[in-house]
Image (spheres, helix red, strand yellow):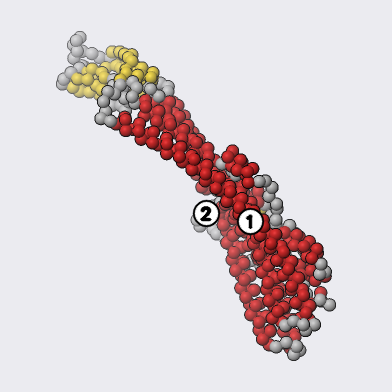
């Protein structure tokens, strides 16, 4: 008798009303948690097909040239696509690639360098030709005589001893390369986290949409039923007006659910860096999946995998390399230098004219700074302070990583407990509705009691789905905190 009054769109109540045992109710909750669908409840296709929002953009619009994704995507497929396409991540990748070439450039300073230059001079006096340079060693010089001349010159230099200046520069460049790589890895992990959050937010929006659609169907059935009772004189008009008002509220809630669902899909497309007019769906539904592992295991994984720890260690190495450069300024700088040139034109000299003669020299040039008014000393002190700052930052990074993992574990553990509590609330709320509905049919309960029981039942169902959503977010968060994707 009870089953005859049930609306056809809400299969969960149908199962519970067929049996009052809590065991069957729990089986139904587990079915909901696993993401399975019954033939009579609102399906994903049915809920999404009524979506009033269809986004389309032209190729001339901003981002209109981006690729269009089609079909249902699993969580792993969404992450893979996002890691491949995300613009911020691609920028970080180019920064890392650039840092590798910077390190190679620093390594090249250990080898010789050869240059070619020309010099035209018209002079009325004997003078010296000199070259401006940023090196610490004295500049090479070449004599020229009175007259006019054109000088093609080849020069080469090879560092012999720099006191650690070149080595420090190379180590600093290598450390910056490792930092850039760590930043790129951190960006990959963060991008995967944002995509997972956007994906589960879309799944939560889809689940809310299905519940909202179920509730609208339920209120349509309930309102129609109440209208018939009012017509027959078995219920006052106020009960029907209350049903109509609740139906209107349910329809507004369903429109809000459509908005949330479309917004969540839009955010997912943004994180994946695909065209916003892409027609995508979700393969993975909002279901409970247990997470193994202990807090200590996640902390150990974070110690091995979090890129921020490697980045902080590389920062210390960079500052130590810069300190080596500062120390090198106290040491002599010795270079092997060679020069060859050919003077053309008419330049009076010992033999009256000099024209078209090649000549050259090879020399070892060395120098050391004797006094610089405290410049080197204060640069060295600054470098030492920078090393201490980087070491303190490394300790802070380790503490931050430990905090991230611990906080993620707290959130995940509490979310798991909330899921268990929400399960019990759904079982209780659905059983309350079953009893109040049965009592109302035999005149033992008023319509308002049955009305409130139905509201609590759907609120409990939403609360359960929300607790699962937060649990899935907690899973993504602790995976990020431990350095995983």
| Quarter of the figure that contains the C terminus | top right
| Residue 320 in the image, given as x and y percentages of width and height | 43, 31
> Which residue is the extreme one toward the left?
124
Above/below status of 412 relative to 22 = above
Say which label, 1 or 2, has the lower sequence index.
2
| Quarter of the figure that contains the N terminus | bottom right
Task: Find disc 2 in the rendering and name its residue.
Answer: 63
Q: In which quarter of the image is residue 247?
A: bottom right
Can residue 196 be seen? no
Q: In which quarter of the image is residue 433?
A: bottom right
Q: Which residue is drawn at 59% across and 60% down?
A: 264
Q: In which quarter of the image is residue 431?
A: bottom right
Task: Find disc 1 in the rendering and name its residue.
Answer: 414
| Residue 207 in the image, given as x and y percentages of width and height | 67, 63
Viewer-side residue, 205 vs 399: 399
Q: Residue at x 58, y 48 (%)?
A: 406
Q: Is mark 1 on a helix, strand or loop?
A: helix
Above/below status of 152 relative to 77 = above
Q: Which residue is drawn at 32% across and 18% down?
A: 366
Q: What element carries label 2?
A: loop
Label 1 to label 2: alpha-carbon separation: 40 Å
**Does 342 sit left or right of 84 as displayed?**
left
Q: Residue at x 80, y 64 (%)?
A: 24
**Does 96 sit left or right of 368 as displayed?**
right
| Residue 307 in the image, given as x and y percentages of width and height | 54, 40
């Amino acid at each position: 008798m009870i089953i005859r009054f049930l609306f056809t769109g809400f299969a969960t109540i149908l199962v519970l009303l067929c049996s009052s045992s809590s065991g069957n109710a729990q089986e139904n909750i587990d079915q909901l948690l696993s993401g399975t669908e019954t033939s009579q409840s609102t399906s994903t296709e049915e809920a999404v097909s009524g979506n009033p929002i269809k986004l389309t953009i032209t190729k001339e619009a901003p981002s209109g040239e981006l690729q269009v994704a089609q079909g249902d995507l699993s969580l792993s497929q969404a992450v893979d696509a996002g890691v491949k396409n995300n613009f911020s991540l691609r920028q970080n990748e180019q920064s890392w690639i650039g840092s590798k070439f910077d390190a190679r450039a620093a390594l090249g300073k250990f080898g010789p360098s050869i240059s070619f230059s020309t010099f035209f001079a018209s002079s009325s006096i004997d003078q010296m030709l000199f070259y401006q340079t940023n090196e610490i060693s004295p500049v090479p010089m070449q004599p020229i005589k009175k007259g006019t001349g054109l000088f093609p010159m080849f020069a080469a230099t090879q560092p012999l001893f720099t006191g650690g200046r070149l080595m420090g520069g190379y180590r600093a460049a290598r450390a910056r390369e490792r930092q850039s790589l760590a930043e790129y890895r951190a960006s990959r992990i963060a991008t995967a986290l944002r995509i997972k959050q956007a994906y589960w937010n879309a799944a939560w929006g889809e689940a809310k949409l299905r519940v909202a659609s179920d509730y609208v169907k339920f209120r349509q059935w309930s309102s129609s039923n109440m209208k018939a009772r009012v017509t027959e004189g078995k219920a006052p008009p106020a009960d029907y007006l209350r049903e109509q008002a609740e139906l209107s509220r349910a329809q507004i809630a369903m429109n809000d659910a459509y908005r949330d669902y479309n917004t969540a899909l839009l955010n997912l497309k943004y994180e994946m860096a695909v065209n916003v007019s892409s027609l995508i769906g979700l393969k993975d539904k909002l279901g409970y999946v247990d997470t193994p592992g202990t807090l200590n295991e996640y902390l150990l994984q974070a110690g091995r995998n979090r890129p921020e720890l490697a980045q902080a260690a590389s920062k210390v190495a960079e500052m130590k390399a810069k300190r080596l450069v500062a120390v090198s300024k106290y040491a002599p700088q010795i270079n092997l230098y060679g020069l060859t040139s050919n003077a053309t034109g008419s330049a009076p000299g010992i033999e009256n004219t000099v024209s078209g003669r090649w000549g050259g020299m090879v020399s070892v040039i060395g120098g050391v700074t004797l006094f610089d008014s405290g410049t080197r000393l204060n640069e060295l002190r600054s470098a030492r302070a920078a090393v201490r700052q980087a070491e303190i930052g490394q300790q802070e990074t380790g503490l931050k990583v430990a905090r991230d993992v611990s906080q993620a574990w707290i959130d995940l553990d509490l979310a798991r407990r909330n899921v268990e509590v929400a399960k019990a609330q759904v079982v209780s709320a659905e059983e309350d509705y079953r009893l109040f509905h049965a009592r109302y049919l035999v005149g033992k309960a008023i319509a308002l009691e049955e009305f409130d029981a139905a509201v609590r039942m759907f609120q409990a169902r939403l609360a359960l789905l929300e607790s699962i959503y937060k649990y899935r977010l907690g899973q993504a968060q602790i995976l990020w905190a431990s350095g995983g994707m």
